[in-house]
Image (cartoon, rainbow, N blue to C red):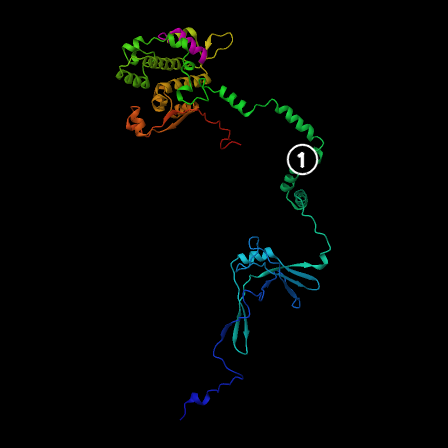
Amino acid sequence: MSHPSSATSPKKRKRDGPTHESLSFELDSSCSKETTGPLLVSFPALQAPEDTPFRCYGRKKMKKDNQKDKDDDGGKYERPLVVGEAPAVEFVSNEEESRRAADSGCSYLLAVHDPRTSKIKVLPFHQTPYILTRTVKALKSIPPADAPSALDYRDARNALGETFGTKKAKAAIRAQERNRVDVNAMKGVIGHVVEGIDEKAEGLLTKEEAKDLVDSTRLVPPFSATATEPEDIYALNDIIPESEMKALNITPLEHNLTTRVMPWKYSKWITAHLKRLDQNEDNSKARKRKLKMLLYVSIMILFRRVMKDRSGLDKDTIYEKMNSVPSTVVDGLLSRFTETTRGSSVHIFTSTMATKLMSYLLALCLRVDDFVSNPRILADDFSLATTNIQNAYRSLGCKLKTLSERELANRGYSDTLADTKFAVLVAPVQFPKAKTGRKKGQA
């Protein structure tokens, strides 16, 4: 008995012609890098008629140094020019677009299948695709129109806005037109405008003159902008006039180096300097000058305390409150740091004068501190915030910075002041630039 499947299984039909188990690949040796070979072209956004004839035109040989367009193997020939012509359209390869396609990094291989031999012949393709552009023959005789100018573009845009825009857009267009300057109308008067500008500009200050004017209005002692040493920036005679310096009596202070014999007895800064002088037995002229400077700092602090009442004080009241100070010194302070109205004997300590007094006082403190001062100690003496004293030092041209351990040791300061920012006067003096920017939140 036969198997059922064998009785019903159909017989396979034999194919005509030769049979092949698999495809085989073969490299066409007729195409090499020395030959042009097949070319691959692309028609973006259009399709050329199938019967369009194409030709490839070679170009002249170029020198290697001046060559701009090279094929992939670095040859010395420029890429051929591909041209096709149909009855209504011409096609020409676009070098710029073709170069962009070459830079995209894609490479291509062309293969031809032979069904008789079941072989796929691979043609080496050494060049990137050619991007073709078209030209309509009927439009070649029409000259190209000029590109619209910015004025034409704006007029066309405004016309569309007037026709289809919202009320807000139309109002913006009309406002823009009102602010628009008619250049043609200005041509006749431009000469007069320029002459008027030149005439008015004659009275303007130069950059150097403007700087000198700003420096002259600074509420600081007279200074030297060309000084190369800190001690030459603010002269001592400009802070303490010679007549007032001679009027200072330091004899009680030489016998008792404490603040108890000074006009103002509560300054920590003066106390620290007197202790240093007490340890130094030197009776030189420099020591006496430093004592006079410390005495004058005490007088300026007292004067600031006395003149706190901004409503003003008469001279007799000021003399009474500063009875331990020579009258020559009091008169000098009143003339430099107070204001009086016509026909009145009342001396007013305005905010401008208070700033000026503070600048003179701190400039004198810098000289005593060898031009490196600690703003925190002086802030305690003046009952002010440290930032206010720091800003006052900046207005004198000081830089705020910390000192190294060596600098602290050389000046006799403790290591606990390593994080303290000292006011250091540096030559040549540089004042902070005035801020001209608009504050946040202001319109």
Residue in view at x 40 percent, y 9 percent:
244
Taking the spot 52% from the left edge, 62% from the top edge, the residue there is 107
Tag 1 residue:
181
The picture places residue 303, in percent across and down from the top left corner, at 39, 13
Depth check: give the residue in front, 292 or 384. Answer: 292
Q: Position of residue 442 (x, y in %)?
A: 51, 31
* Left or right of 349 on screen, residue 257: left
Residue 125 vertical placement versus 246 (above, below): below
Q: Quadrant of residue 242?
A: top left
State the quadrant of the N terminus.
bottom left
Residue furthest front as drawn: 63
Residue 119: percent from left, percent from top: 52, 75
Q: Is residue 24 left or right of residue 250?
A: right
Identify the secondary structure beneath mark 1: loop
Q: Is residue 340 magenta?
A: no
Q: Which amino acid, mark 1?
A: Val
Q: Is residue 330 magenta?
A: yes
Q: Nearer the viewer, residue 409 or 67?
A: 67
Question: Chief secondary structure of the magenta span?
Answer: helix
Which portion, as a residue range, is magenta? Answer: 322-336
Classed neighbour count for the residue bearing mark 1: other residues with Cα under 10 Å, few (<14), some (14–19), many (≥20): few
Residue 47 visible in the displayed image: no
Task: Tell me, yes or no, if residue 207 can be seen here.
Answer: yes
Q: Position of residue 328 (x, y in %)?
A: 41, 7
Between 80 and 171, the residue placed more toward the observer is 80
The image quarter in which residue 132 lies: bottom right
Q: How many marks?
A: 1
Is residue 385 rendered to the left or right of residue 80? Answer: left
